[in-house]
Image (cartoon, coloured by chain):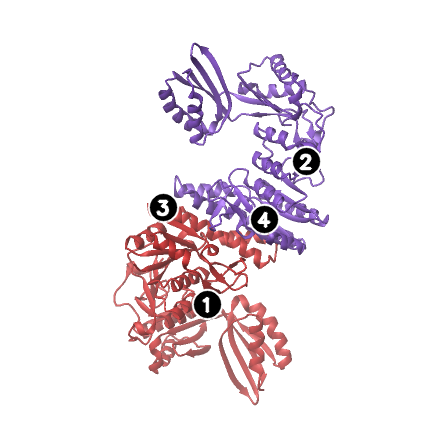
Chain colours: A purple, B red
C-alpha cells in the first residue's frame, strides 16, 4: 500500500462545513487503498485573530511566546478534522508536531525542519488509521515549540512525505491547477498538467502564489512528487510537479506571472571602487532584507548607478540601512520607485533557445510598454514595467509565446 | 525564597485588558521576593466556543480528540499572559502540561494527575523566571494529551504547589473571600478569614461554588495552604484554607449554603429484604450517578420507602436506570420532587455541640418552613425545603447561629 500525504490550507478548513468537505477528500484517498496522512493549517482567519490578541498585549511580543500562541491554531483544526473523519466511520487520530517528532532548529517564528521521526505515524497508518498532522509547527530537541514561518504547512507536508517515503504529496488549495498565467488577468491562460520543480520554483518566485517556493525546494531535494489539487473538485487531476527527468522538456516557455509587491531602489553616483557592491548588499543581507533584481550601470568616469528591487514590506527598513551606507560610500542620492511591477517568463526550455528574451521584449514593444529594468536567469526572464501596464504586458507576452488556450475553458478558471 | 503558586480562572483572563491585570497580580507576588508559578485556564468563553465547533462536526465526538481540541485554549492564555508579564519588564515563559510533565492516567476528559515532574519548572524559577503554566491539561506517559475535567485548573494549581513544596497556593477568582452565607442572599453574611479543609470541603459540597471540592481535597491531602483571593482587589487578604491543626476551632458553625440543583426521587413500597439498597444504589453508581442525601423510612410491615437526591442533570438517566430496578425489586412506584432546595449548615465544631441540629430545626420552624428531608454528617446538617423558601431559610438560620455581621460591610460584598 502506498502512502499519500495530503495538505489542506487554512481556507480549506475555515469552518465546520469545509472541514467536513476536507474529510471527504481524505476518506476518498483512504478508500482508494492508500495509507493517508493529512496535514492541516489553522482554520481560516485564526492566525490573524491570535496575532491581533498578541498585539493588544505587546507591540513587540517575544517570538517564543508567539510560537506558543500561534501553534494552538492547528491543534483546533487537526482535532476537528479527526472528529469529522471518525464521524464518517473511518479510524483517525490527530497528532501535534511534538507528538510526531517534527524536530526543528532552535529558532522561533521561522525554524527549519532538521529531522522527522516516522515511527509513531508509521505505527498508526500501519494499523489502518488516518493520521491528521499539525502543519506549520515543530519542536526543538529541548521540547520548545517552534513554527516554520511562511509556507510552513506546505513544508511540513512535503517533509513528512519525504520522511515517510510517500508516493506523492497532494497540496489542496482553492485553485484547481497551475496555469500559464493568472486566469483572472489572462482569460486565455492554459492549464498545465505537469511541470518540473525548477519551473515551478521560478513560477513561485516570480509571483505565482499557488505553491510556496520553500515546499517546492524541499520536494525537489527529496524528489517527492507534488500534486496541486482543488479541495472543491476532487475529480480534477490538478497539476503534477516532478523532477526534470520525469518529463520531456518540449516547451520553451512554461508560464508567466507578475509580482506587484516589489519596489525599486536606486543609489545614484556610487564611486566605482572594489567592495562597494558587497558593502551595500552585505548591509541589506545583515538586516534580513532580500534583494531581487540587481542592475549596475556605468554613469560616467568612475561613478555607477546601482538599482535593485526589494519587497515593499522591507522598504522602510532598507532605506534606513542604505542611508547609513550611502554616507559611508559617498554616493549622492537614494531614489525609490513605487510604481513598478515585475513581469516574468519562466521555462526550463529557454536555456537552449536564444530567441525567448528577444520575443519578450518584442511583445512589450508591440504593446507600447516601456521596460524599466531587465534581469535573467537560466530559466527565467523578468522585466520591470509600470504598475498600470502589468495586465496588458501579461496578455501580450502570453499571446506572443503561443500560450493562449485554443478553446475557451470556462470550467477551469479558478475562483 | 518561597514558592507561591497562583491560579487564575477563565473570567480573570477573558480579554487582553484582564490578562494585563492578572500580570500585575503575578508581578506583585514576584516583586515581593517570591518565586512564582501562575496557573491559568482558557480565556473566558473559549471552551464553550470550542465545544460548539465540535458539536457542529459530531454529536458524539471522541474524548481523545475533544481533549486535543480543548487543551488548545490554555495554550492561548498562557502565551498571552507570559507576553503581558514580559511587557512589564519581568522575565517569564509559558509552559504546557506536556512541557512541565503533568502526568495523568490514560483516561480522556477527566484524567487524574498521577505525577508532576518538577525539574524543568524548578530550573526556570531558580533562574528568577516566572513560569506561566497551563491548567486543566495533562499528558499520559505515552504522550497523549488529556484534560482533568471539572475543577481541573484549580487541581493543576494545587498539585503543582504540592509537587513544588510551595509555601501556599492562591486561587484568584471574582469574589474576595468565603462568607458565612452567599452575601447576595443573606446581606448580613460575615466574611471568614480562615477555614479548615474539612469545613471548606463541606461548604463546597453543599453549594458554595467558590472552590472545587477536588482541589480542596488535593490541598488537604498534601497539606498545601490555599488562599482564596480576588483578582480585582490585590490588597484583600482573602480567605485562607488550612489544616485543622493550624487553627483553633472556636466556632460551632462556619457557614451555611444552599444547593438548588438537586431533585428528590422516592421509591415507594420497597420490599424489606437484604441487599435491596445495594441493588438500587449499585445500579446508580454503575451509571456514574452520584447520590446525595438518602433516607429510608419504614412504611408498614416489611415495606419501606427509600428517598434520595441526585443532581438535576442526572435525573433522566437516573429514572431510566431506576425503572428497571423497580420492576426487579417489585417496588410500587417512583416519585420525583423537583421543588426542593438543600440548605446546609457546616462547622467543624458542631460534632461536640449537640444543640446545633436542634437550633437549625428551630430556625426553620420559626420561619414556618416545612422540612422535607434531613441528613447529617459529623460537620454538616442538611435539610430539604421547598425551593421558594430557600432564601428565607438561609436568613433565619444565619441569624439563629449568630453569624450575622455586627456592622454593615458594604465593601466586602462580592459582585
User: At numbered mark 4, what does the secondary structure look like: helix, strand or loop?
Assistant: strand
Q: Nearer the viewer, residue A388 or A255?
A: A255
In front: label 3 or label 2: 2
Q: What residue appears at the point 61 percent right and 56 percent down from the top-left corner?
A: B59
Question: Do badges 3 and 2 share one subunit?
Answer: no
Relative image position of residue B77 (x, y in whole percent): 44, 50
Disc on res. B260: 1
Q: What residue did someone put label 4 on?
A: A133
Between A206 and B371, which is closer to the camera in this rendering? Answer: A206
* Number of other residues with Cα within 10 Å of mark 2, as a class: few under 14, some 14 to 19, many 20 or more: many
Tell me what residue is drawn at x 42 percent, y 31 percent: A287
* Pointer 1 with pointer 3, Cβ within 8 A: no
Q: Is residue A357 above or below residue A288?
A: above
Query: Separation of disc 4 and disc 2 at Cα?
Result: 23 Å
Which quadrant of the structure image shows residue A370? top right
Judge whether B402 appears above or below A286 on screen.
below
Q: Residues within 10 Å of mark 4 (few under 14, many from 20)?
A: many
Mark pair 3, 2: CA separation? 47 Å
Question: Dot 1: within a 10 Å radius of its alpha carbon, few (fewer than 14), some, or many (20 or more) residues?
Answer: some
Which one is earlier in the sequence, the residue at label 1 or at label 3?
3
Q: Residue B267 in the image: x percent, y percent?
A: 56, 78
Q: What chain does mark 3 sit on?
A: B
- Furthest residue in direction bottom, as rendered: B301
Q: Marks 4 and 3: in contact by CB < 8 Å?
A: no
Image height check: is B387 above or below A38?
below
Under circle 1, the secondary element is loop
Q: Which mark is residue B86?
A: 3
**Residue at the limit of the structure toward the left, as seen here:** B407
Quick one: label 4 or label 2, which is nearer the N terminus? 4
Labels 3 and 2 touching (C-beta < 8 A): no
Alpha carbon separation for disc pair 3 and 4: 32 Å
Amino acid at each position: 500500500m502506498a502512502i499519500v500525504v495530503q495538505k489542506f490550507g487554512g481556507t480549506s478548513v475555515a469552518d465546520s462545513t469545509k472541514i467536513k468537505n476536507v474529510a471527504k477528500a481524505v476518506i476518498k484517498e483512504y478508500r482508494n487503498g492508500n495509507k493517508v496522512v493529512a496535514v492541516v493549517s489553522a482554520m481560516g482567519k485564526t492566525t490573524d485573530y491570535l496575532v491581533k490578541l498578541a498585539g493588544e498585549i505587546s507591540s513587540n511580543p517575544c517570538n517564543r511566546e508567539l510560537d506558543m500562541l500561534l501553534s494552538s491554531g492547528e491543534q483546533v483544526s487537526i482535532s476537528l478534522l479527526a472528529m469529522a473523519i471518525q464521524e464518517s466511520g473511518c479510524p483517525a487520530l490527530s497528532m501535534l508536531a511534538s507528538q510526531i517528532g517534527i524536530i526543528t532548529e532552535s529558532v522561533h517564528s521561522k525554524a527549519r525542519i532538521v529531522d522527522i521521526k516516522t515511527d509513531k505515524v508509521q505505527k498508526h497508518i500501519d494499523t489502518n488509521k488516518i493520521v491528521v498532522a499539525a502543519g506549520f509547527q515543530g519542536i526543538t530537541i529541548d521540547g520548545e515549540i517552534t513554527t516554520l514561518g511562511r509556507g510552513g504547512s506546505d513544508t511540513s507536508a512535503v517533509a513528512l512525505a519525504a520522511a515517510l517515503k510517500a508516493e506523492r504529496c497532494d497540496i489542496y488549495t482553492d485553485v484547481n491547477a497551475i496555469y500559464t498565467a493568472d486566469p483572472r488577468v489572462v482569460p486565455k491562460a492554459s492549464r498545465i498538467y505537469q511541470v518540473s520543480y525548477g519551473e515551478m520554483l521560478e513560477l513561485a518566485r516570480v509571483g505565482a502564489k499557488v505553491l510556496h517556493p520553500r515546499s517546492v525546494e524541499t520536494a525537489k531535494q527529496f524528489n517527492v512528487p507534488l500534486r496541486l489539487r482543488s479541495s472543491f473538485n476532487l475529480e480534477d487531476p490538478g497539476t503534477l510537479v516532478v523532477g526534470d527527468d520525469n518529463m520531456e522538456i518540449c516547451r520553451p516557455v512554461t508560464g508567466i506571472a507578475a509580482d506587484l509587491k516589489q519596489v525599486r531602489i536606486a543609489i545614484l553616483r556610487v564611486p566605482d571602487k572594489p567592495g562597494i557592491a558587497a558593502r551595500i548588499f552585505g548591509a541589506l543581507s545583515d538586516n534580513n532584507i532580500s534583494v531581487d533584481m540587481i542592475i549596475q550601470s556605468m554613469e560616467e568616469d568612475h561613478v555607477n548607478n546601482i538599482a535593485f528591487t526589494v519587497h515593499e514590506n522591507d522598504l522602510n527598513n532598507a532605506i534606513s540601512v542604505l542611508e547609513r551606507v550611502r554616507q559611508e560610500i559617498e554616493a549622492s542620492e537614494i531614489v525609490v520607485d513605487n510604481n513598478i511591477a515585475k513581469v516574468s517568463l519562466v521555462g526550463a526550455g529557454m536555456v537552449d533557445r536564444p530567441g525567448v528574451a528577444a520575443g519578450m521584449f518584442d511583445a512589450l514593444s508591440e504593446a507600447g510598454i516601456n521596460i524599466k529594468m531587465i534581469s535573467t536567469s537560466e530559466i527565467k526572464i523578468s522585466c520591470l514595467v509600470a504598475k498600470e501596464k502589468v495586465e496588458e504586458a501579461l496578455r501580450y507576452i502570453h499571446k506572443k509565446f503561443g500560450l493562449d488556450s485554443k478553446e475557451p475553458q470556462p470550467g477551469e478558471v479558478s475562483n
